[in-house]
Amino acid sequence: VVLTFWRWLTSDYQPYVTNTVDVYNGSTWVNLWTSPTSPAVSDQPTAGNGWTLVDYNLTPYANANLKVRFGFTTANGNAPSGGWNVDDLLIENRTFPSDNNLCTADTCNPLTGGGTFTPIALTDGDACTTDSCDSTRSFLHSPVGASYMGESFSSLAVPTGWTAGTEWGFGAATASSGHNYGNPDPAFDFTPSSLDNGIAGVVIGGNAALTTHTAYYLTSKTVSTSGLPSGQKLYLTFRRWLNSDYSPYMVNTVEVWNGLAWTSVFTSGGNPGVQDAAWTLQQFDISAYKNANMQVRWGFTGSVNALTVSQWNLDDVSIQYCP
Ligand SMILES: [Ca+2]
Ligand SMILES: [Ca+2]
């Protein structure tokens, strides 16, 4: 069973506008397609117009009351530019081409019936991991070198050895609202193929309190990295989704315990503040700080005069060496 329609869609990207195509499977709506965080959807004129032929395999959802719907959301007051146009919608019984490989995206050309099998992008953008895909479409990002610490926050509770200061917590990623600067907290974690959605963050699903304070810290467990082979590089890697006022209203830091003192590897600066709208890869060479009691901490200061912001979200923290 194949859904085919012609689409002419021009739209801002997430989180400003989210476009969806859903199918009703008899008991609930199932998402077939969600427009990306980047780039924006812009069906370009080809052959004289911008109509784009798209199709989806509905076979897994076949039922006595099948229907489809098209949706869009808006946020931050941004209106969709143009938005949806749909024509010649067709749901038909047709053999859908498949290469039986879950690591490729299968599409069908309704004009020819032929299939196109496009490998799904695997990379996580981290040169210190090898990226692979297995038959269940589980994306695996394995450290190239030895890993001293790997934390995906899947327990939704305080990981052993970690400590959370005021406003810091652990749990399932939850979209926030009510901020007046930057972007909301993410609705999903970063960890590939995880269903737990576990992250660490400052008021997960909400905004930092408007109080004046010195840094509140999230502090990792202690690991010994003194065995790092001479000449090898040691990296602190994590995913960041941070939205913050700028200095002096709010200062964000990442520090590493070098055995004697906390050493700064990141300090946020002046205007503009950090405004992440996606999980961003953060990687720091901490080879110089290897020691028997290495720790990492993330901090933020606050002010009664600060803007209302969603603040730190963290996922997939690792300390590893990458030859
Ligand atoms: Ca996670
Ligand atoms: Ca938050």
Image (cartoon, rainbow, N blue to C red):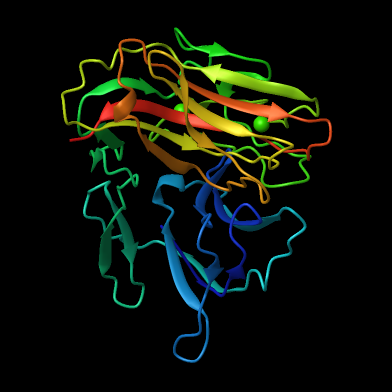
**Seen from this angle, which residue lies furthest top?**
161
**What is the total number of numbered labels drawn onto the structure image?**
0
Q: Is residue 253 left or right of residue 221?
A: right
The quarter of the displayed image where residue 106 is located:
bottom left
Residue 181 can be seen in this image: yes
Residue at 43% x, 12% y is 221
Residue 184 in the image, given as x and y percentages of width and height: 67, 41
Q: In this view, does 72 lie above or below 204?
A: below
Residue 80 in the image, given as x and y percentages of width and height: 69, 66
**Seen from this angle, which residue lies furthest bottom?**
48
Q: Is residue 143 left or right of residue 37?
A: left
Residue 202 vs residue 51, the one in the foreground: 202
Residue 123 in the image, given as x and y percentages of width and height: 30, 47
Q: Is residue 301 left or right of residue 109?
A: right
Residue at 66% x, 57% y is 72
**Seen from this angle, which residue lies furthest right?**
305
Residue 190 can be seen in this image: no
Residue 121 vs residue 90, the one in the foreground: 121
Look at the image and tell me in which quarter the C terminus lies: top left
Q: In this view, does 26 lie above or below 48?
A: above
Q: In this view, does 319 lie to the left or right of 306?
A: left
Residue at 61% x, 43% y is 269
Residue at 41% x, 27% y is 317
The quarter of the displayed image where residue 42 is located:
bottom right
Look at the image and tell me in which quarter the N terminus lies: bottom left
Q: Is residue 151 above or below residue 24?
A: above
Q: Is residue 52 above or below residue 191?
A: below
Residue 315 vs residue 298, the one in the foreground: 298
